Image (spheres, rainbow, N blue to C red):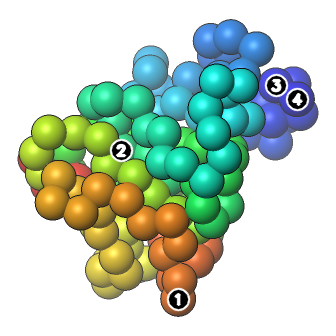
Amino acid sequence: MISDYLATHPGGVVLNDNEISYDGGRFVVTLTRPGHTRAAVADCPQGWFCFYDRTSYGYPRGRLSDCGRQDLATWGWQYRVESAHYNLTSGSVAFLYSGSRLFSVGAAARALGDVAPYRNWATHVYRYC
């Protein structure tokens, strides 16, 4: 599974049998839900904001923590976000389509299990720190 993902999303460094890191650890992809976590539960690690390829926090999961604007195409995640979770103590992140705000998650409202009607629209994120 790791080799398949890297074939279509080159440039990553394998962290373990389920995770790939890009840009020196700025972006991490977890391919499948770890065995100890329940399905349909937001499970973003502390200190990150996460976005999921499926509704109800279905994997693969991408995670970032940097402030400011980031292009999801850098890691092949444009048009893929269907749910999101924010697990930082302050701030928020807006998911954007060509500069227009679609939805957000943050310290005040941490999780969206379904970002409808904007599933698979996000092209960028902007984290407000």
State the CA–CA distance, disc 1 to disc 4: 30 Å
Please tell me in which quadrant of the rendered image residue 54 appears: bottom right
Q: Residue at x 61, y 32 (%)?
A: 37
Q: Kindly state the secondary structure of the residue where label 4 is placed.
A: loop
**125 to the left or right of 84:** left
Mark 1 crowdedness (10 Å alpha carbons): few <14, some 14-19, many ≥20: few
Q: Kindly state the secondary structure of the residue where label 1 is placed.
A: loop
Q: Residue at x 34, y 76 (%)?
A: 103
Q: Nearer the viewer, mark 1 or mark 4?
A: 1
Q: Which residue is mark 2?
A: 49
Q: Name the kind of residue labelled 4 in the image.
A: Met
Q: Name the kind of residue labelled 3 in the image.
A: Ile
Q: Which residue is mark 3?
A: 2
* Rendered view: 84 above or below 43: below
Q: Residue at x 47, y 26 (%)?
A: 23
Q: Which residue is mark 1?
A: 117
Closest to the observer, 104 or 21: 104
Quick one: quadrant of the N terminus?
Answer: top right
